[in-house]
Amino acid sequence: MALKMVKGSIDRMFDKNLQDLVRGIRNHKEDEAKYISQCIDEIKQELKQDNIAVKANAVCKLTYLQMLGYDISWAAFNIIEVMSASKFTFKRIGYLAASQSFHEGTDVIMLTTNQIRKDLSSPSQYDTGVALTGLSCFVTPDLARDLANDIMTLMSHTKPYIRKKAVLIMYKVFLKYPESLRPAFPRLKEKLEDPDPGVQSAAVNVICELARRNPKNYLSLAPLFFKLMTSSTNNWVLIKIIKLFGALTPLEPRLGKKLIEPLTNLIHSTSAMSLLYECVNTVIAVLISLSSGMPNHSASIQLCVQKLRILIEDSDQNLKYLGLLAMSKILKTHPKSVQSHKDLILQCLDDKDESIRLRALDLLYGMVSKKNLMEIVKKLMTHVDKAEGTTYRDELLTKIIDICSQSNYQYITNFEWYISILVELTRLEGTRHGHLIAAQMLDVAIRVKAIRKFAVSQMSALLDSAHLLASSTQRNGICEVLYAAAWICGEFSEHLQEPHHTLEAMLRPRVTTLPGHIQAVYVQNVVKLYASILQQKEQAGEAEGAQAVTQLMVDRLPQFVQSADLEVQERASCILQLVKHIQKLQAKDVPVAEEVSALFAGELNPVAPKAQKKVPVPEGESEDERPRAVFHEEEQRRPKHRPSEADEEELARRREARKQEQANNPFYIKSSPSPQKRYQDTPGVEHIPVVQIDLSVPLKVPGLPMSDQYVKLEEERRHRQKLEKDKRRKKRKEKEKKGKRRHSSLPTESDEDIAPAQQVDIVTEEMPENALPSDEDDKDPNDPYRALDIDLDKPLADSEKLPIQKHRNTETSKSPEKDVPMVEKKSKKPKKKEKKHKEKERDKEKKKEKEKKAEDLDFWLSTTPPPAPAPAPAPVPSTDECEDAKTEAQGEEDDAEGQDQDKKSPKPKKKKHRKEKEERTKGKKKSKKQPPGSEEAAGEPVQNGAPEEEQLPPESSYSLLAENSYVKMTCDIRGSLQEDSQVTVAIVLENRSSSILKGMELSVLDSLNARMARPQGSSVHDGVPVPFQLPPGVSNEAQYVFTIQSIVMAQKLKGTLSFIAKNDEGATHEKLDFRLHFSCSSYLITTPCYSDAFAKLLESGDLSMSSIKVDGIRMSFQNLLAKICFHHHFSVVERVDSCASMYSRSIQGHHVCLLVKKGENSVSVDGKCSDSTLLSNLLEEMKATLAKC
Amino acid sequence: MIQAILVFNNHGKPRLVRFYQRFVKEIQQQIVRETFHLVLKRDDNICNFLEGGSLIGGSDYKLIYRHYATLYFVFCVDSSESELGILDLIQVFVETLDKCFENVCELDLIFHMDKVHYILQEVVMGGMVLETNMNEIVAQIEAQNRLEKSEGGLSAAPARAVSAVKNINLPEIPRNINIGDLNIKVPNLSQFV
C-alpha cells in the first residue's frame, strides 16, 4: 500500500504542475494554441488515473486554462471528484475549479448536493469554509433549497470564521430560493449583534443588499441600525448602514429628520473621506425626501455643498469625481445652492480626465437658466471643436441638445440662435448623432411657428451646400440632417426665398447617393416644393415658368424611379405620373396649381410620443387595424391623389367634409381649445397665420451662420430691453414719487425679466383627451429581486420551515402537495374547519404584532413622545389577550364554565370571541372523534355543494415506468425553466429483491426529437451510469436531463436498465426494458399568472383556439381543477362559480390559457395557445385525465 | 455587490479573472479585453472610476481600478458599494498579497494563480466583502497553508523537490518587478479597522 503511494507520487513528479504549465506556455509564445491543446490532452490522460493527487493537479491546471478562455466544462465530473477528496489540499482545488466553471446550466451540479452537505458539516472549519466559498459562486435554486437548512445552522457555528461566511452566503440562497428568507431572517437579524465584528459586518452587508432592493420591508429595522450607526467604529459597517439609510429615508421622512444630526456630527468628526462622502450622500437623500419643511435645512445643504466643494477642489481626481457626482444629486432639488459654484464646474470641463468632464457636463444640464444658456453652450461649442475622440464629442453634442431642449425649450430665448447652433453642429465630422440634430430641427421648426421662415432659409442653405452630400458615404451619421432639411423646406416651402433654386438642389444627381429613407423624403418634398412654385407662377401669370418647372420635374424624377430602394421607387414613379398628367393639363392651359397644392393642404401637429398608447381602442377593432397617429413624417391624412376635375366648389365641400370627419374621428389629433393653438381651427396652408418676425439679421446668409452673432445680438437686445424697462421703472417711480411713496423692488435681473426675442408659440405636444403623460408603463416587470419582496414583520407560520433533507423515497417528500398550487392544498386539508379558526386566531395575532411593530417604529421615530393612546380601544385587546391566556391555561374544560364567564363579561365583543373559542374546542373534539383520513370521507359523493369538504386521495406525480422481481422504476418528468427545451426525468429505483443492485446503467435510444444529455465524450449507444447502488429494500432517485427539439407532440423513448444483482449465491446480470413517455403536459411548467396579464394575453389575439368537452363527470369542480393543476401543471388564474381560467407555460415559452366550465355532469375546456398542435395534444391528454374522473 | 474582479498586466494578459455573475466564457474574455482597453488609455493621474456602461450590467455599475507597476486590479461593482471603500479594499488585497508572497511581483501572480484565488476568497466571497482586516485575512491564509503542509507530508515531498529543481533551471525569474509604489496616496486607509 505504502509502496503504491510512493510509486504514485513518483509518477506524479513527472506530470506537469501548474507552474510547469505556465512556464511552458510562456516558452511557446509562437505556437501557444498548439501547446495548450497538447497540454489539454495530457490533462485528459491524468484525469483518467485513479490517483486523486494527479487528478487534483490536472484540475488545477484546467482552472488556469479556464482563465485564458478555454472551455473546461467537459471536466465538470472530474472537478466533482476532486471536490470530494478527503484532503483539504485537493478539496480546495476542486472547489476553486467549480466556483470558476460551474453555473446553473451545469448538469452534474445536482450530484454535488450531498458532498457539499458533508463538507458543510465537516469538523474542520476550513473544509466548511471552502465549501461555503465555492457554493457562493455556483448555488442553484435546487442547491439553495436543499442546503438552506444546513447553512442556517452554520450561522450559529462556534467559529466566527464560519459564521460570517454562512451569513454572507445566505444572500445568495435568498436570491435563488426566496422562500427561505422568512424562516432565516430572525437568525440573520440576530447576527447584527454578533460579538465578532466580521460576522456583524457580514450581516449588515446582507441586510443592506436585501433592503436596497425592497426597502420598505426593512423599515422596522431602522432603530437597530440607528443604534449600530451610533455605536460602531468599523467604517465598512458604517458606510453600509449609512448607504442603507439613504435607501430607507425616501420611505419614511421622519427617519430622515432623526438622521440629520448624527450624520452631521459624523461629517464634522470623521477623517475618512469614504465615510464623509457617504454621509454627505445620505444627508442629500434625506434632504430630498424632506422636500419641504424644516427651515434649518439650508444649513445642512450648505454644509454638504461646502464639503463637496472641498472634495472637488482636491487634487485627488477620485475625490473630485465623487464630489461632482454627489453635487448632481443636490442639483435636482436645490439647484440654487449648486448654481453658485458654476465657476468650479465650468473649470472641471477643462479637466484632463474624461470621467470628470462628463460628470461636469451632467451638472451643467441642471445649471442652465435663460440668462446663462447661451454662454454655457458657447463654452461647450468650443469644447466640441477641441475635443479629441468621437465618443466625448458625441457626448458633448447630445448634452448640448439635451441642455437646450430640456423642459420644452424652457431656457431658449432666441430660436434663431438655436437653429444656428444646430446648423453648426452639422459640421462635426464622424458623429453618430445626425439623427438627433435632425429630430431637433424638425421639432423646433414644427413647434416654434415664428422660426419657420428662418429655419427654412437655413435648411435650404444646408441642402444647397455640398459638404453634407460630398462625403455622405463616409460620414453617414450626419447626412441624417438632410432628412430634416428636406422635410422642412418642403413642408414650409411658402417661406422659401428662392424655391426654384432649392428645388434644383434637391434634384441633383448626387442626391441618389444618400440612404434610401432620406431620398424618399426628398422625393416627397420635392413635390411640395413644386406645388408651391406652381402656385406662385400661376398667380404671377407666368405659364411658361410653370411649364419649365414641370419639365424640370419630368426630367429629374426618373433618377429616383431607378432607385434600388423600394420606398423611393414607389413614391417617385407615382409622382412622376402625377407630374406628367399635370404637364398634359398645362399644355391645355388648365390652371392646376390650386389642385396640386391641395394635395398638401392641412397643418401637421406634433404628437406626444406616448399619445398613441393612450388612444382607446374602439370596439370591434383590433390593434393591428388601429390607424397610426402621425408624427412629422407620415402624412396619411392627405388623400394621395385628387381628381383634377374637382372644381373649386367640390374642393370646398370636401374640405368641409374632411373637417367634419376629423372632428368625429377620435384618432385625428384635433386642435385643442388652448389659446396657443386657436389658429389651427382653419385648415389649409394658406390660412396659417405666420407671425412676422422682426429679424435683426439678414436672412440670406451667404455661408453658414455663426451662432456667436446671435449671442452678441441677444446681449444687445437684452441690454435694450433692460434700458427700456429701467426707463419705464423710472417713469413709474416718478409717478410714485408724485403720489404715495411706495416700496419698490430692487432692479434685479432674474430669469423672468428676459423676454424671448420672438413672439414664440411653443406648440405643446398633443395627447388624447384624458390621457396623462405618466411613467407607469416604464416599470420593469422582470426584476429578479422582486421575488425577495417579502414582508418580514409577520410572525412565522408553522408551514414556513426550511426543507430538511429526508430520504428521497419517503412518501411525504414526494407528495403532490409540493407541486400543487394553493387551491388544491386547501381542499386537501382534512381538518379544515379547525384550521380556519386557528388561522383566524393567528391572523389576529399577526395583526396585533404588526400594529405593535408599527407603533414601536412610530415611537422611535417621533421626537416628541406620541400622544397617549386613546384609552378606549386599548384595553379591549389586552383583556382579550388575558382571556386567551386563561382559556389556554385552562385547557379544554367545560363549556359550562365558559358560559359562566360569558355572563360575567357583558361586552359583546368578548362574547363573540369566547364563542369562537368554544367552537374551536368543539371542532377539536369533533375532529378527535373522527378517525383521521377516514376512507368514507374521501369516497363520499358530494351533494351539498361544499367541495371544500371533499378530499382527494393523495396523488403522486410519479408514474410507474417498469418493474420486475428485482426492481421497480417510477418516474416523473419535469420541465426546467432554466434551460429551455430541456426536461429533467427523475427516476426512482426501488430494490425489491434481497440482492444488492449495482453497476446500474441506463441506456435510452434517442429519437430525432429527444436526446438524453450524456456526459462529455460518451457516445449515443453508451449507457449512462446510475450514480448509486441499491441495497435490498432501498430506493433512490436519479435524475437525467433530456433535450427536446419540438415540444408540440408527445413522444415515447425506449430504454433499458441493466444492472448486476448480487447476493450470497453470486451475481447475475439483469435487464429491464421501459418506455419513457413524454406527454405534452410534462413540457408545461406551473407558472402563476395575474388576471390582468392573463386578460392581456387573451386579447393579444395571436393565440389559436381549440376546445373539448367531456361528459359524465361527477367529481366536484374544485377537485377537477386540482387535477388539472396537478397532472397538467396549470395554475388557476381566476375562478368564478363553476368557471375558471387557468394558465401555464411551456418550457419553450408557449402560453397556454384554459377556460374550464362545468355544466351538469360535463366539463368543457376551451384552450388558447400560441401553438395549435401543442394545444390540441394537450387537450387530448386532458380529456384522458378528465375521463377518469 | 461586486460583479467581477480582474487582474491583468500592462499588456492585457489576464492574471486573475473572477466573475461573480455568470457570463459565458467568450463574453468573459471580451469583458477582460474591453476593460483592459478602457483602463489602458487612462493616465495614472486621473480618477480611478469608470462608468462600466455596456460591459457588465449597465449604468448601475462602475469599474474601480488601481494600477500598480505592471498590474491593473479592476473591480466591477454596483451602486451598493462605496467607491472609496472599494479602492481601499483593492489596497488591502494587494497588501495582503504582498505579505503572503513576501514582496509580491507579477511573476508570483503568474505562477501561483491558485494561491491568489485562495487569498481573494478570504477577502471577497460570492461578490460580497468578507473581511477587510488584513491581519485576520493573513492569519486565515497561513492557517490554511499550514493545514495543507501537514496534509502533504511525505508524499508531497518528492514533488516539491522536483519543482525546486525545475526552478533552478530557470534563471530568468526576475524578482524586481515588485509593486514598488504601495504608498500610493490613499486618503483614508488607516481609518479602516
Image: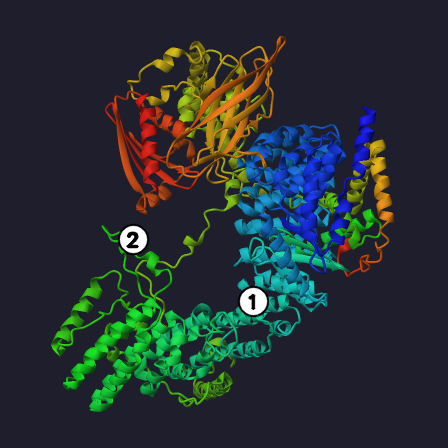
Please tell me whether mark 2 or mark 1 is closer to you in this view: 2
> Looking at numbered disc 1 in the image, what kind of residue is underneath it?
Asp
Horizontal and vertical percent position of residue A844: 47, 29
Same chain for mark 2 and mark 1? The answer is yes
Q: Is residue A1106 left or right of residue A44?
A: left
The N terminus of chain A lies in quadrant: top right
Of the pair A1108 and B77, the residue shown nearer to us: A1108
Left or right of residue A112, residue A880 in this image? left
Residue bearing the label numbered 2: A623
Name which residue type carries label 2: Glu
Q: Left or right? Give the position of A61 relative to A714.
A: right
| Residue A1061 x %, y % | 58, 15
Q: Position of residue B28 (x, y in %)?
A: 61, 51
- Foreground of the two, A792 or A213: A213
Determine whether A328 is above or below B168 in the image: below
Q: Secondary structure at mark 1?
A: helix
Q: Is B168 situated above or below A295?
A: above
For the point 37% across and 34% down, which residue is it? A1049
Q: Residue A520, relative to residue A699: is it above or below?
A: above
Of label 2 and label 1, which has the lower sequence position? Answer: 1
The residue tagged 1 is A362
Disc 2: CA contacts within 10 A as few (<14), some (14-19) or many (>=20) = few
* Element type at mark 2: helix
Q: Chain of mark 1?
A: A
